[in-house]
Amino acid sequence: MNNYHRMAQPAAQSTSTGTRRERRKAETRARLLAAARTLFVERGYHATRPQDIAEAADLATGTFYVHFADKREAFQAFSEKAAQELMERVRAAGAESADFEQRLYLSLEALMAYADENPGTLPAAFTDSAVIAAELPQGASLQDQLADSLGQGLRQGMERGALRADADPDVIAHGIVGFVTQALRCGGKRKRARSDLLGEITRFVSRALVLEEEEPS
Amino acid sequence: MNNYHRMAQPAAQSTSTGTRRERRKAETRARLLAAARTLFVERGYHATRPQDIAEAADLATGTFYVHFADKREAFQAFSEKAAQELMERVRAAGAESADFEQRLYLSLEALMAYADENPGTLPAAFTDSAVIAAELPQGASLQDQLADSLGQGLRQGMERGALRADADPDVIAHGIVGFVTQALRCGGKRKRARSDLLGEITRFVSRALVLEEEEPS
DNA sequence: TGCTGAACTTGACAACTTCTCAAGAATGAA
DNA sequence: TTCATTCTTGAGAAGTTGTCAAGTTCAGCA
């Protein structure tokens, strides 16, 4: 019959501040996560050792393992946080317009802006995550999150009669995410101008999906 | 002034048979490669140790390193071989038709047939290869090979006036490869019927690209 | 046929990683 | 201040990758 955990608050409220200890622990974890991000981006997954992360956070190796079960988990935490940040940006940008093609364009623009502001992060987190996370994270890879978000949009468009409805919106959404990923990668390598790229991509997708009633000219 | 390598043949002809030693060496390498393939497919990259591969090929660890500089190189050899096999199948299937949409359909069918006949190979070789090969293999990932092949087709179609020509065929080709990859992955997870999937995918791409003069009804 | 040295093979081991855990330091309640 | 609990530490256990000196095989030669 142990009864530690005697706090002022009745329920186990672990969010926001908490006791000083909890705050410090959260801070320690945040320091580790920040160090992990820097190193994973700079050196890549394999060249970054847990002890490097701990040292960069000015902590001992053992502390790393208090906060993360293993190196993979730390990588996943980094990757998920980046995905979350990016999704927020993309969702906010896409919400600004009701027109499908324009929404897609704005979303892609937001994605590229994030990539610019956080150089190396997307490649580090999502080239590698395919292998590192491997089997474990059935839930929500960035690609799946983007596809789910897009899939919702497609479903709405189909119901409204704005988009062709003769295909599975989820399959199409995943396909489009794949299309965008590869097209941007290719366009980036060849140093195509960003606006041209975005234009070609959105046009391609629109032609496949949008039921145009009439076009001016 | 050393002059080993005195063979009957004048030039250094290293293909086909060669001397008995050469044949045995090639055979050893082939045994290692076969063992590597089995293990990489069964267990994945990380869970396969070079010594496991050597043992499965009934050879010692050191021999592994005579034929491959390191574990990555062995993986790359496996991955490249699989890509080559697949490309042959896809090219042969696509050559059977001149119509763009049908050619795409046949190519995808060939791709899926290969995946069926070699279960686990494609995921093992190309989920992982993104991370393992990582920076090194600028040349020809499977995705790039498929995209190059498709890009040629697109260019032809554009010149013939059969396809819309207002976008960079290479960017579009890479995009399509990404589309197919993700759409198939998603469709596979949801156990969609194969023919439906292929139909939806080819229809999507055709609508975006094909300049239809007139359709029967 | 037996000899020779180049090429191939071997496996113990060195170098390096990841992760653990017993011991010590810090914190907050009484 | 004292004590129980939690957090931190870093040496080292466990396990992997890649090396190399020594042993084995074989084509060419007399």
Image: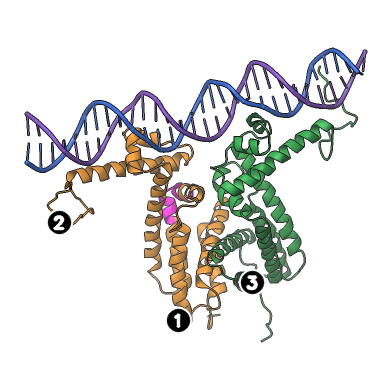
Chain colours: A orange, B green, C blue, D purple
Residue beneath the point at 64% across and 71% down: B195
**Is residue B134 visible in this depiction of the protein?**
no
Residue beneath the point at 38% across and 43% down: A69
Q: Position of residue C5 (x, y in %)?
A: 79, 16
Q: Amino acid at mark 3?
A: Ser
* Residue A119 painted magenta: yes
For mark 2, what is the residue?
Answer: A10
Q: Are marks 2 and 1 on the same chain?
A: yes
The numbered mark at residue A160 is 1
Q: Residues within 10 Å of mark 1 (few under 14, many from 20)?
A: few
Q: Amino acid at mark 2?
A: Pro
Q: Residues within 10 Å of mark 3 (few under 14, many from 20)?
A: few
Judging from the image, mark 2 belongs to the subunit labelled: A
State which quadrant residue B88 falls in.
Answer: bottom right
Magenta region, residue range: A113-123
Q: Position of residue B126 (x, y in %)?
A: 59, 51
The numbered mark at residue B195 is 3
